[in-house]
Image (cartoon, helix red, strand yellow):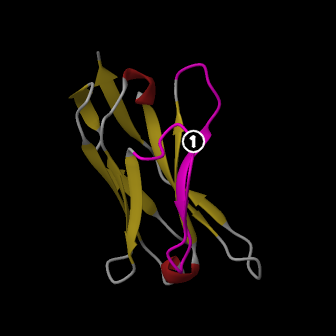
Amino acid sequence: QVQLVESGGGLVQAGGSLRLSCAASGSIFRISAMGWYRQAPGKQRELVATITGGGKTNYADSVKGRFTISRDNAKNAVYLQMNSLKPEDTAVYYCNANSPSFLSYNYWGQGTQVTVSS
C-alpha cells in the first residue's frame, strides 16, 4: 500500500511559479513510476508529467519548457516545479504512483488546487 500526500498548491498570478510536492509512504516508491496529473472543472483528468524510477521524464506538450518533474528517492518524494504559469494551468493536481510491469498497482493522492489568475 502506498499513500500519497500532495502539498504546495495555491493562488498565483499569471507568469508566477509554484512548486508542488508529493510525499509517498511505502517501500515501493523507488521502483514506481511517479506522475503528476491535473483536472480542470468540466474536463477529464490529463497527464502533466511522469518520471520513471530511473529518472526518465515525459511531459505534456502544453507544459514542456515550463514545468519540471523531479524525484528524491531518499525522501520518497516527487516534485513539480511550475514556472510561467498560465490561467489555463488552473486545476486540481494529483500525484500518481504506477507499478512496473511485473507488479500491478496504481495509487492516487487526494489532489491539491492550483489557481492561476490573469
Residue that extends furthest to the top in the rendered view of this protein: 118
Residue 66 covered by magenta stretch: no
Residue at horizontal 30 percent and vertical 42 percent from the top: 83
Q: Position of residue 39 (x, y in %)?
A: 54, 33
Instruction: Identify the image quadrant of the N terminus.
Output: bottom right
Q: Main secondary structure of the magenta part?
A: loop
Q: Is residue 92 above or below residue 115?
A: below
Front-most of residues 22 and 116 = 116
Q: Is residue 53 left or right of residue 6?
A: right
Say how many tags the image has: 1
Residue 62 covered by magenta stretch: yes
Q: Position of residue 109 (x, y in %)?
A: 48, 53
Residue at image mark 1:
61
Residue at horizontal 59 percent and vertical 60 percent from the top: 107
Q: Label 1 crowding class (10 Å Cα cut-off): few <14, some 14-19, many 20+? A: few
Q: Is residue 32 left or right of residue 104?
A: left
Which residues fall within the magenta stretch?
A: 41-65
Q: Is residue 114 above or below residue 33?
A: above
Q: Which element is circle 1 on?
A: loop
Q: Position of residue 31 (x, y in %)?
A: 57, 81
Instruction: Identify the image quadrant of the C terminus.
Output: top left
Residue at horizontal 44 percent and vertical 44 percent from the top: 111
Q: Is residue 13 left or right of residue 115?
A: left
| Amino acid on which the number 1 mark rests in the picture | Asp
Front-most of residues 42 and 19 = 19
Q: Is residue 40 above or below residue 45?
A: above
- The image quarter containing residue 58 is bottom right
Q: Position of residue 114 (x, y in %)?
A: 35, 33
- The image quarter containing residue 9 is top left
Residue at horizontal 38 percent and vertical 22 percent from the top: 87
Q: Is residue 61 above or below residue 96?
A: above
